[in-house]
Image (cartoon, coloured by chain):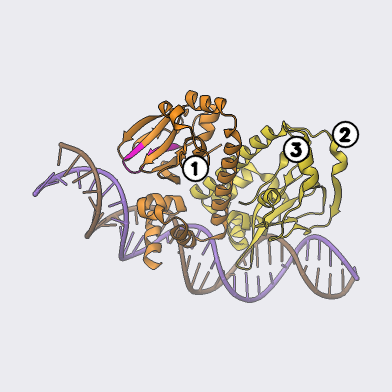
Chain colours: A orange, B yellow, C purple, D brown
Amino acid sequence: MMANQISPSLNKSSDMVIDWERYGHLFKIKTVPAKTILLNEGEVSRHGYFIKEGCIRLWFNNKGKDVTFQFFFENEGVSSIESFKNGEPSLFSIETIEPSTIYVISKNNFDKIFMENPVYNAFVQETIYKRLSHYSRLFMSYIKNTPEERYRELLKNSPHIIKRVPQHYIASYLGITSVSLSRIRNRV
Amino acid sequence: MMANQISPSLNKSSDMVIDWERYGHLFKIKTVPAKTILLNEGEVSRHGYFIKEGCIRLWFNNKGKDVTFQFFFENEGVSSIESFKNGEPSLFSIETIEPSTIYVISKNNFDKIFMENPVYNAFVQETIYKRLSHYSRLFMSYIKNTPEERYRELLKNSPHIIKRVPQHYIASYLGITSVSLSRIRNRV
DNA sequence: ATCATTTATTAACAATTGTTATCGTCTATC
DNA sequence: GATAGACGATAACAATTGTTAATAAATGAT
């Protein structure tokens, strides 16, 4: 029950290719400014999102403070998967970091595409495996590395995050304060 | 690519019930002492495990030190899922903590059961979702909580782990040293 | 262009953890 | 029962992070 993406279904550039001629009309294009909340923590997600341009973060409120735990960029699908799938309240918010252009699909239309194309299910399963793998990795990175090592790892494996995301979000993502991240950057 | 379990297929007490009359003979019972390594980091996993009695930890070597990151108990299935599924070297070891009695199934027999029961696939998918949820939760707990808060959380949500697992493994699981855990326990 | 807001850096001090080492207890095994 | 090894508590000191606050720089809005 948590943070996830559903890239398969919306990702035209991935292994699975949506028939754009046939289904393109089911997606609406939405252009929004930075810091636009697409889904609020506590609401039920009724839409899937796919980023054409821009970037997004997932975060939740913890004792009055923002806790950011995932970033998404161009050509990635985003949703509060448990909420979208089961109609439960989302445990986190989805918010743009930059001005963004986003494809939006309703749950009904999303389900329709999958009903008509059961072959996609195998792909969904594969994607869930990948996501599982992603979380396992992050989790292990937390256990075995210090904040400084995690920052170095991020710098090595995901330089695009460092480049585009404001530091206080990255600090939150690393589980430290922005002050501490600033010190780390100073000595790295 | 990491730590997982495959409880569905082996878990007689879960939602999915294996036809024990029909498939029981495919499982071998193995009784082993504490600290027995069932799978070594770097080896390819060719067996799935299901705990009848005892408990198990998953760990990997990080710069010469043990890093424990998951525990399993009675009636849970355990495997190095990526290794078992794709024939890749396992990124972690599977080791008993207590003297244990374990059902073991070969990959061939495991595949056989699934080939003959395609209906189980939906269940597998559901289990992967749950596992995904589990890791998301753990990950978020790391981001938002201090070691002390994580310990309190563990005490509240998984007291059986505190009770049965030696403290230095728990410390590792919490991402801290056993010395620090000892101090935390002293002031909690 | 100006003003307000957001973001990042730095400083000072408190709190926590890591490291290393010692000591006592418990347990397994012979 | 003796002995070795595993386990946990504790102490002392170094290193790191958190907290709070002040300041500077960058960004946005009017």
- Quadrant of residue A61 in the image? top left
Q: Position of residue B160 (x, y in %)?
A: 70, 45
* Cα distance between the residues tagged 1 and 3: 28 Å
Q: Secondary structure at mark 2?
A: helix
Residues at badges 1 and 2 in contact (C-beta under 8 Å)?
A: no
In the picture of the structure, the residue carrying the numbered disc 3 is B114
Compared across the picture, whether B16 is left or right of B63 comes to right
Residue reaching furthest to the front = A21
Pick whichever, A186 or B128, lies toward us: B128
Pick whichever, C25 or A89, lies toward us: A89
Read off the magenta span. Answer: A93-101
Tags 1 and 3 on a common chain: no
User: Crowding at label 2, few (<14), some or many (≥20) Cα neighbours within 10 Å?
Assistant: few
In the depicted structure, whether residue C27 falls above or below residue A65: below
Tags 1 and 2 on a common chain: no
Q: Secondary structure at mark 3?
A: helix
Residues at badges 2 and 3 in contact (C-beta under 8 Å)?
A: no
In the picture of the structure, the residue carrying the numbered disc 1 is A14
Question: Does the magenta-highlighted stretch encompass residue A95?
Answer: yes
Q: Position of residue B6 (x, y in %)?
A: 70, 43
Pick whichever, A51 or A182, lies toward us: A51
In the picture of the structure, the residue carrying the numbered disc 2 is B21
Q: How many marks?
A: 3
Compared across the picture, whether B142 is left or right of A155 comes to right
Residues at badges 1 and 3 in contact (C-beta under 8 Å)?
A: no
